[in-house]
Image: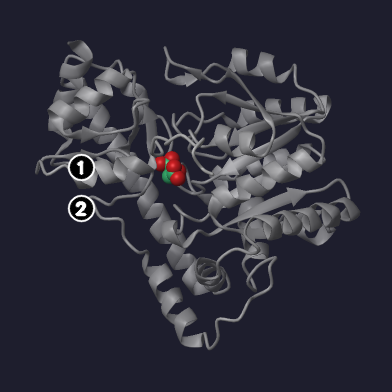
Amino acid sequence: LFANLPLLPADPILDLGRVFAIDNRPHKINLGIGVYLDEQGVTPIMAAVAEAEARVETAEDTKAYLPPRSVPGFADNIARLALGQDSDLPGSGRLGVIQTPGGCGALGVSGGLMRRSGIKTVVMGTPTWSNHRPVYTAAGLAVRMIPYLDRATGGVDFAGYRAAVEQLGPDDVLLLHGACHNPTGVDLSPEQIDIIADIAAARGFLPMIDTAYHGLAHGLDADAYILRSFAQRVPELLISYSCSKNFGLYRERTGALIAIGKSPDRAAVLESHMLDLAREFYSMAPAHGALIVADILGSPELEANWRSELATMQRSIQARRNLLADALEKTEVGDSLSYVRDQNGMFSLLPLSPEQTQRMRDTHAVHMAASGRINVCGIRADNVDYLAGALASTMIE
Ligand code: LMR
């Protein structure tokens, strides 16, 4: 029966962890999957998360189902975090929000919602996260790529991006990244965000903002600029929100899909379809991580502790960027990659071919995605000179 199914290659990002684990060279460096690592190379359980988790476990006396929309206090607090304490959207009735299994679950539900709404095409800047195309193709939507990264400057090709966005219409979705673009680390500036949001309002296409690194570029409020600017300017908006990185809850699969409707009635319709799609796919999201987030965001003291830990993570990521740029400047690469200093979040895209990334792994024990994407969290004071030397010899060869 299954004879016509071909064997598929492993996922290009998820498989990096397996390959790294079986590399027994002691000097190996992990620049692969997008997971925060501290200066000791550890992905810590945040202290606020550990405290909330203990409270959740003490309070929990049953594993019976919880409401499919959200565990108590999760979805509404995520909307507050994304849209801001002062946003009038929650009180306006124009919000539909459901808890999802991570950001990826939110993307999947959003794809179903788009297909049911008659949307034909999801338009993405080049390059984008390697799972974006599969998620939306699986939802039956066409995917079209437009310019985004200017590889020469390591910044945004804003003229090319804007010109392509100006051609979009009501059958299209424009997929944007929240702060900390994956895989490039190159974000739109606030001025550029406002321009694109105004074009969305004028042309009538639907913006969808994939938010997976909130707080890791310049802090929670600064990073939410894109969400809040679009929310003010367009009548309808979708936001997927992941708690994997900013709460360190990766394996707990904790996220949300937020829909802003034109009116309270439209928002109710959107939320009803989001719940219906979730029921079709997986019935309801797992509770554990969402209960932890709800506990943190429901306690001012714990929320303050979490915010401060998140800020420490953000500063540590920036410090790792500076370490790499400083070390590269001492090699033949010079300042040609100095843009890694100014990019945001965990990722930068280095100008390496798949063959060069393979050589980085085989010859130097440096593991990264074949695209040349690196997670800067694998950089430490005690490995950065070795890494810079390996990069220089691979790039100059
Ligand atoms: C990544 O891009 O490395 C992370 O978002 C993890 C994933 O699921 O791909």
Q: Amino acid at mark 2?
A: Gln
Indicate the position of residue 180 as horizontal and vertical percent values.
Answer: 48, 38
The residue lying furthest to the left in this view is 26
* Residue 380, numbered label: 1
Whether residue 80 is visible to the viewer of this picture, yes or no, is no
Going by the image, does 118 lie left or right of 125? right
- Quarter of the image for residue 375 reads top left
Tell me: residue 208, above or below residue 87: above
The residue singled out by tag 2 in the image is 40
Q: CA distance from mark 2 to mark 1?
A: 8 Å
Say which label, 2 or 1, has the lower sequence index: 2
Question: Circles 2 and 1: CB distance less than 8 Å?
Answer: yes
Query: For the residue with label 1, is its CB less than 8 Å from the closest atom of ligand 1?
Result: no
Q: Amino acid at mark 1?
A: Arg
Indicate the position of residue 301 as horizontal and vertical percent values.
Answer: 49, 73
Crowd around label 2: few <14 · some 14–19 · many ≥20 (10 Å): few
Nearer to us in this view, 236 or 276: 276
Secondary element at tag 1: loop
Q: Residue at x 31, y 35 (%)?
A: 321
Label count reads 2
Q: Residue at x 44, y 75 (%)?
A: 53
- Quarter of the image for residue 312 reads bottom left
Locate the N terminus and report the quarter of the image it occupies. top right
Nearer to us in this view, 14 or 56: 14
Secondary element at tag 2: loop
